[in-house]
Amino acid sequence: MEWCVKFTSAALDGVVIIEPKVFVDERGWFMESFNERCFQEGLSGLGLPVPKAFVQDNQSSSKKGVLRGLHYQLGPHTQGKLVCVTQGAAFDVAVDIRVGSPTFGKWYGVELSAMNKKMLWIPEGFAHGFLALEDDTCFNYKTTNYYNKDSERSLLWNDPALGIEWPAMEGYLISEKDQRAPLLRDADLLHI
């Protein structure tokens, strides 16, 4: 792999932390933010399947304390997501919602930032959310399926059954829709 990317399995089967090689000199820095061949080889090297092709790129900008999620789509519109932060920092979370999975209901969180340039691969079958740790946090994600409003679902971000350890802040800014999301036990989920 020419661009020397490091792929590391996270605590949830299928979720992967990706650290690109960054080339720095007196002018600044350069990195490949995505290379399909390397991405596929990196996942295969971890014994993971190659996902469907990416079909949509999304971006958001959030103030410090904005919490978005936990979002997912039901089949046949499930999405794999490759996520990163290009400005600011976020605490990013994936939750296994695959009924029957050995890690069902478990979560994994990692800080993604413009400084560390880490990315997270979240395959189909996981809910996703993040907390902006700085103002003007720009969050980018590539998805393997198009957004489908009728398939959109969410989980309550602070469901005690999940026990997500969000970073402490004075207050979170959460949409009304995300505040009304169902608990894991009441949600429409994915069966494997």
Image (cartoon, rainbow, N blue to C red):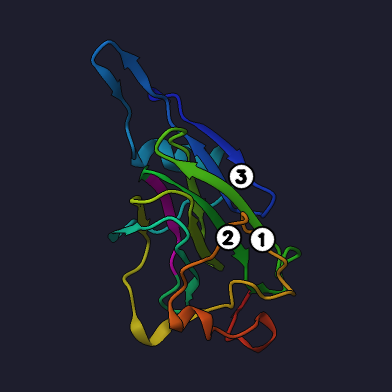
Image quadrant of residue 80?
bottom left
Crowdedness of circle 3 by 10 Å Cα count: few (<14), some, many (20+)? few
Would residue 74 be visible to someone looking at this image?
A: no
Height in image: 44 above or below 91? Answer: above
Amino acid type shown at disc 3? Gly
Residue 154 at x, y percent in the picture: 51, 78
Residue 30 at x, y percent in the picture: 29, 24
Residue 157 at x, y percent in the picture: 59, 72
Q: Earlier in the sequence, mark 2 or mark 3?
A: 3
Along the viewing direction, whichever of 154 and 9 lies nearer the viewer: 154
Magenta range is 79-85
Q: Is residue 107 left or right of residue 80?
A: right
SS assignment at label 3: loop
- Of the residues tagged 2 and 3, which is closer to the observer? 2
Q: Residue at x 33, y 56 (%)?
A: 54
Q: Earlier in the sequence, mark 1 or mark 2?
A: 2
Height in image: 40 above or below 158? Answer: above
